[in-house]
Amino acid sequence: MVEDAATHDLVCDNLAVSDLGVAAYLGVPVHAPDGSVLGSFCTIDVEARTWSDENQAVLLDLVASVESEIALRAEIAEREEAEAALRQREARYRSVVENVRDAVCQTDLDGRWTFLSPAWEAITGFTVATKAGACRHVEVYAQRLHDEHDAVAGMAGSVTDITDTLRFEAERAARERTEEALRLKTVLLNNMSHELRTPLTGILGFSGVLVEEAPPDLKEFAHLIDRSARRLQDTLNSVLDLARLESGALELQPERLDVLAEAQGAGALLEPVAKQRGLSLSVQCEAVQATLDRGALHRVLYNLVGNALKFTEEGEVWVEVGPGAAPRSVVLCVSDTGIGIDEAFLPKLYEEFEQASVGLEREHEGSGLGLAITKRLVSLMGGRIEVESEVGAGTTFSVTLPAEPPAA
């Protein structure tokens, strides 16, 4: 804990103090389950300050959460190893048990059956007297038979119907492939979150500076860099949000909201986009209260209004909010005078990465995830989304949400 870095003997010469202006620091080490230190959670201030007990408690709570997560992941890894070992033991045990129920058989040197156990009929469907078989899938375990002079006299073994085993193994292999795909997807998304967000934040920061300070002959390039970086950021955020929704990691935090104020806020946020495209954007709302997740509601409004602006070349976009026809419900309608949606595309409207135009013929930028995320968020809040559209005339998306959370 450093309250005044400039006068602290250990850190006063640190480059963070002189170059970055760090004046105060509070850090707590993060430990692995074996007690080794992995890193730290820290917070800084650009002014000297006294760190309160509350400041320290918050940081300690964060570290406790991280250490719990690390310990949980270690426990899961150990459990997976234990389950793998258990599966191996179960396989050996199953082999022994199944052999007890196998059809025991013997043949002579010419391959003629000399003995068949009663299980032959259960496995093959043929009687022992016929000494023939036509079962679905079998495995034969055999060894040579020797006579009293140690000469080979025939074969002894067992026949096992492995049809169910093959099906089970195929199902298990498919399940393991699915689990591995999910694990790799999680690893990929975690890497994307860290490896892409960190440099992207720097790019956005410097692109903003370039837009403001670039000479006139470079302004266009600076704006292009800034737009491209923000588009990449939107795509990355959409992919990560969709992954959180699919994995169930997104937990809603319902609170009492003034839906009128939230809708007006979303309209104000996108007003500059509308002006840039020469469109009229209006919000027509009745005062209505609802218990909803603020972030999810914002994302639904932002996605729908943003889509309407993107696909409207001229005219207007308007938002209507008010009580729904169903008791204790709220309806959000986003309408536009845009290009409309082809009826053939409507079944794919909410699918991931689906867009009406693709490849070199694509007319509008985007990741194809906005409506997929919107539909999932609406469903997560207990609502439904509907669309009415006419090519060349415009589109209306209607979202109906419960004004009160469902009873326990």
Image (tube, rainbow, N blue to C red):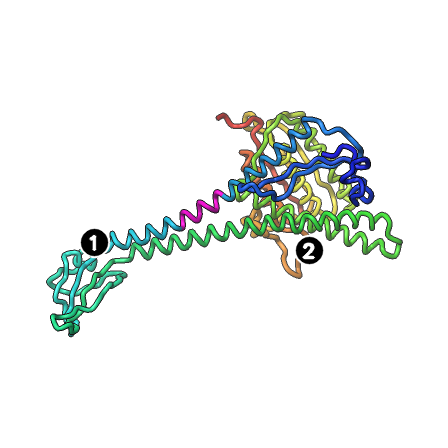
Is any part of residue 253 visible from this angle? yes
In the visual, does 157 lie left or right of 355? left
As displayed, is residue 303 above or below residue 4? below
Q: Is residue 78 magenta?
A: yes
Residue underneath mark 2: 363
The residues colored magenta run: 75-84
In the visual, does 143 lie left or right of 325? left
Q: How many numbered badges does the structure rendering display?
A: 2
Position of residue 48 measured from the top left corner of the image (x, y, whole percent): 79, 32
- N-term mark: 2 or 1: 1
Kindly identify the residue that appears in the image at 64 percent across and 27 percent down: 257
Depth order, front residue of 178/261: 178
User: Tag 2, which secondary structure?
Assistant: loop
Position of residue 135 measured from the top left corner of the image (x, y, whole percent): 23, 61
Amino acid type at image mark 2? Glu
CA gap, disc 2 to disc 1?
A: 66 Å
Residue underneath mark 1: 101
As displayed, is residue 239 above or below residue 290? below
Q: Is residue 5 magenta?
A: no
Find residue 265 and report its image quarter.
top right
Depth order, front residue of 125/403: 125
Is any part of residue 70 visible from this angle? no
User: Tag 1, which secondary structure?
Assistant: loop
Dot 2: within a 10 Å radius of its alpha carbon, few (fewer than 14), some, or many (20 or more) residues?
Answer: few
Depth order, front residue of 104/67: 67
Amino acid type at image mark 1? Arg
Instruction: Report the residue that reaches farthest toward the front.
Output: 9
